[in-house]
Image: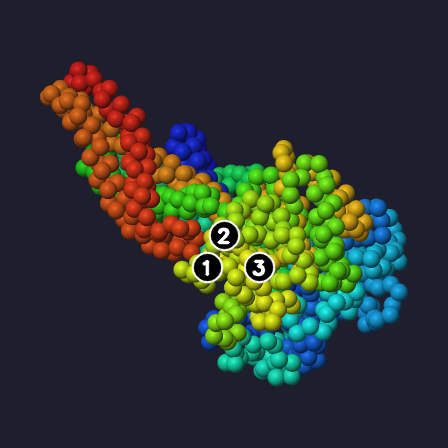
Amino acid sequence: MILHDLRYAVRTLLRAPGFTAAALFSLTLGTGSSAAIFSLVDATMLRRPPFADADRLAVLNITQRTPREGELRRRWSWERFQLLKRTVKSFEGVATSSNNVVTVTGSSNPEPLAVEIVSTDYLNVMRAPLVAGRGFVEGDGSAGATSHAIVIGDDVRQRRFGGIEPVIGSTLALNGVPFTVVGVAARGFNGVSGLAQAWIPATVAPLVTYRDYLTTNQNFITVIGRLRRDATIDSARTELAILGAQIHAERPSDADTPQDEFSATAMTLNDARIDVVTRRALMLLAAAAAMLLLIACANVAGLLVGRAAARRREIAIRLAIGSGRARLVRQMLIEGAVLAAAAGALTIIVTAWVMPFLRVPITLARGRNFYGAVGEFATPTLDWRLFVFTFVICACTVLLFALLPALRSTRTAIAADLKSGGAAVAGGAARLTLREAIVGLQVCLAVVLLVGCGLLLSSYARLRQAPLGFDPDGLITFMIRPSEVKYDTSKAPALLGRVLEEIERVPGVEAATVDGCAPLSTQCANGALRIVGRPPTTAADAPTVLRHYVSPNHFKTLRVPIIRGRGLEDRDRAGSPAVVVINEAAAQRFWPGENPIGKHVWFEDAPAFGSPETSAEIVGIVGNVAYQPLNENAIQPDFFTPYTQFTYPNRMVLVRATAGESLALAPQLLQAVRRADPDLALFDVQTMEARAKLSWSKQTFETALFVIIAFIALSVAATGVFAVTYFFVTSRSREIGIRMALGANTGQITRAIMRPTIHFALPGAAAGILGALLLARTMRASLYETSPLDPGVLCGAILVLIAAVIAANYLPLRRALAVNPVDVLRSE
């Protein structure tokens, strides 16, 4: 019987191509949007990281509880990790990892290489698949070795060695230090960072990257652990809470206040890669997609109610000859299931088509959670999870859009429907009321999405119009990462001087500078400010400001105006009096109503200008520059000191081109940098416009998806309004003709047609405004300088809804006004 009902349902739907096409279109839009958003949520939050037994991997953190900020999560120093490794019992293995980018040297073509600096057990803890050779063993990287072990990724084998076997035993020089390839990781394994192309032992780090890697008290090393089979993450946290305090007692971390308390904790690797911003943004999109799915289901439910009204006589006949109500409900549910199955198949096809375009922006996927250097692993894929999700939502939609109309249509007055022959009867009014309620729900949800869309658009417009404080046009930026072993802070100024000198000789370069970061980034250094002559404060109360070690051409390169005093000059060199230039935000915050020029400042625990005796004199004030992302407190107090008086070798280089496409200078800039040091390579070469777009890519992504969802929702809701009005006009053509014959004018007919629309649209819109106000409050953290209760956005959403309703009523109204009263009276 089910097979019979299935065949009958298919034949019935094929005989009504208009209804079937409209229903499939609505359902595919709803389920397709939900499937697309699910693929993003799944990739970012649900799918396990791509490691063997990933559910047993955890990120371990030191915790620091402060009176002002509560609990903070820190990473580890090498010495603290050694204490942890000797004492922890909940993990079958713990290992370290820290990200770095080094230069492959020893050839005519130095190139950047992303590496993870790891402890010996790292590859075992991660269950790294090796396709050749071995992992690390004790003794790799020992002091005095002429060559050190390195494990490379498959892409490095293909790129550097041409995939020629055997690669084991080959030599690779990193920052001038020779390494011997002992193993090759399988394609697709990129470590816990998701970026690594090679792995080197942590014991070699002092020779390649950071001289004090093994001895510093700084907590900058990520620790990964693999839980024992008999341990849980909760039992591990209990153990770490005790061990963390013991480790701190033996090897104290630097405290901000005497009241700080230190311990340790752990969280699953999957949780560690997700921060609050990521969860909030994706949940917002998921909620929007769910609303769109409800609107689509409601639209199909409305279509089914109208279809059932047209089939009243058929239903009455089937009931009259003995068909049971349950039998008819099952038949209609099977029709709904056929529609849902077809929509599911179309959803998979559409999702497969759009999948290549679904990419989570780095700024959204890799939130600044500070839990460690953990990758996002957030590339959506078409896999069994998406198929299961699509099947589930299709099954749910059957219940959402098919069950209620099926139950309602079988509650019929058999005698009246048999006599009516399919004409409108008293029962039609009830069915119309049900349909109006369904479309009112669509209007309600559409208003919610329209307001959310309006808020994000308003926020995005304000973000793009916000002043940056500098001119991004014609700026090209890149990093240089010299070996900190070869170039310590005493040798770094001379190297950077040669680099800038060679760059400024390149034709087409107007000016160049160095800094620790580019504007609109999250990498700027900071320090605790002290002002000479003011009462001392505790380290915890000292304000934090951004620090920049720059060249004299810095403000010329960025085209930042000097407001008062002077900028940095060539005479500000090592051995001359220490100087500093501040921005307007610093002047207004720390010297309101005063002239700060001539004041002296120093910075707590800084390697330079770190005491009252070595304080720097303020010599100038410059305009504000957005050194942080615009939605993250972009303008902060900035303090600029000359790199010639102190700097680190790893620097961002910013070059102002005189004209044309700045990226066209990249090959010449590379040659200029190599003239300063043949072992240098350019990292992360981008125009400043590209960096700016990246800084607000999260907002672009959220806003674009929300606009698409809101537009589809409004279109589907307008379709529902059109269907109800069209049904009203079609079923009451006789009444309309009689009214015209009795002298009703165009305005009266228009009001009569629009009255049912107003009847269900107004309550739906009012409920939608209330729902939108609730949604807006949850969106507060995603908005930039936009009030969740922005009256302009609310009014704009209402105007858009009114326009959509009028557009939806246009064709039915034209049909009503085209009724010929003579033909109506003649038919009587």
The residue that mark 2 highlights is 564
The tag earlier along the polypeptide, 2 or 3, is 2
Image quarter hosting the C terminus: top left
Q: Nearer the viewer, mark 2 or mark 3?
A: 2
Circle 3 packing at 10 Å, graded few (<14), some (14-19), many (20+), is many
Q: Among all residues in the image, which is located at the extreme left? A: 742
Q: Residue at x 63, y 36 (%)?
A: 658
Q: Nearer the viewer, mark 3 or mark 1?
A: 1
Image quarter hosting the N terminus: top left
Instruction: Please tell me the numbered disc located at residue 580.
Output: 3
Q: Picture coordinates of residue 41 (x, y %)?
A: 52, 53
The tag earlier along the polypeptide, 2 or 1, is 2
The residue that mark 1 highlights is 595
Q: Amino acid at mark 1?
A: Asn
Q: Residue at x 42, y 29 (%)?
A: 17
Residues at marks 2 and 1, CA–CA distance in whole angstroms: 9 Å
Q: Amino acid at mark 3?
A: Val
Q: Picture coordinates of residue 434 (x, y %)?
A: 26, 43
